[in-house]
Every structure is written in structure tokens, then in C-alpha cells.
Image (cartoon, helix red, strand yellow):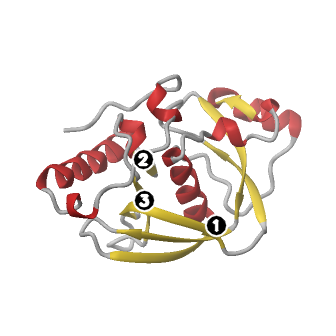
Amino acid sequence: MSLKVAQLGQPVLRQIAAEVPAEKIGDPEFQRFLAEMAETLKEQKGVGLAAPQVFASQRVFLAAILPPATEDGPPGVEVFINPKLGALSEETAQAWEGCLSFPELLVLVPRYRQVRIDYFNAAGEPRALALAGFPARVVQHEFDHLNGILTLDRAESTQFIVKASEIDAFTDAMGEVEDEDEDEDEE
């Protein structure tokens, strides 16, 4: 069963999500919730989905950033529970980001190029990843959702919030953003 995605204006998107108690991670109900989040992410064709986006104010998100299981397969999806995020360098890059909570918009967002994320996986095991480029962007986007922050809040100017159907006209008029991790996938 897939879950309903909260759209811009829903209060849950602006709340700071609560930590997931360690003893809850292995609970069948929580595991079912994670499976439903994964199904929703796949159905929505997104690269990331945070619990607040499905009306659950919990510190958990999914991100399709792992190497594919097969050579031509889709990226693997990792579960991030109670993540802690830090920049590995001060270097930033700008790229257009979409969001499943307002799919009609793209926002030009500066993000750290390299981050480290410490978290618990779906089995409740502690994990850490050092990420760069697009995967680093995805986890920063999803981590923001856990703190009630949207890409709209990260735009350096409202002129960098564009209707997705008009992005080509905008970039033709303003020039392309030069960045190696530029991607318009929805998160």
C-alpha cells in the first residue's frame, strides 16, 4: 500500500520530526511503515522521501543513492533513521531540485558538495556514509524535511523558484547553472 504525499501547506512539512525510539525500529508496524514508504517512493518515481512527507513526524527518510544491484538496475534505496548530518568541506554547489510535496516547482538550491551522515538502517544497525555530488544533495534535501525546512527556504532568491514546465524558458533566458551534480529528479 502506498501512502498519501503531503503537499505544500500541510503543517507536518514545517514541524521538526521526533526521534524514532530504538526499540521501535524492529517493531512489525514500523517495518510495515518503511515498506509503505519504499512503495510510495517507487510509485512517485522520486529519489527520496521523508516521513513528514507522508504525514508521519518521525526522523526517518529513504534515499535511492546506493549502487544498483544489477549493472543496469535502479539505484538501491537506503533507510536513514535518526540521521546526523555534517559537511565534509565548506565547498557548495547549486542545482535545481524538485520535491514530491510540490512537484510543479523546481528550486535552485545551494548544498554542500560532500557530507557525512551517521544513522541507523532499517535493521537498527548504526551506519555512516561519506557522500559527494548528487547522493550528498539528496540526503541534505531529505534531512531538511526532518527539520521542517523546504527547498523554497534554501533558494537564494525567489527568482530561483520556477514552475517545472517553464524551466527551459527560464534557463534559456538566464543561462544554465553549471554544476556537476545538476539534476531535476524529485526528492
Q: Quadrant of residue 126?
A: bottom left
Residue at 67% in and 35% down? 152
Q: CA distance from mark 1 to mark 3?
A: 14 Å
Whether residue 183 is situated above or below residue 26 in the rendered picture: above
The amino acid marked with disc number 2 is: Leu
Q: Which residue is mark 2?
A: 49
Dots 3, 2 in contact, CB < 8 A = no
Q: Which residue is mark 1?
A: 133
Residue at 76% in and 59% down? 93
Residue 74 seen from this side: no
Residue at 71% in and 34% down? 167
Dots 2, 1 in contact, CB < 8 A = no
| Mark 2, secondary structure of its residue | strand
Q: CA distance from mark 2 to mark 1?
A: 18 Å
Per the rendering, the mark at residue 116 is none
Query: Residue 62's spot in the image, x, y percent?
Result: 39, 55
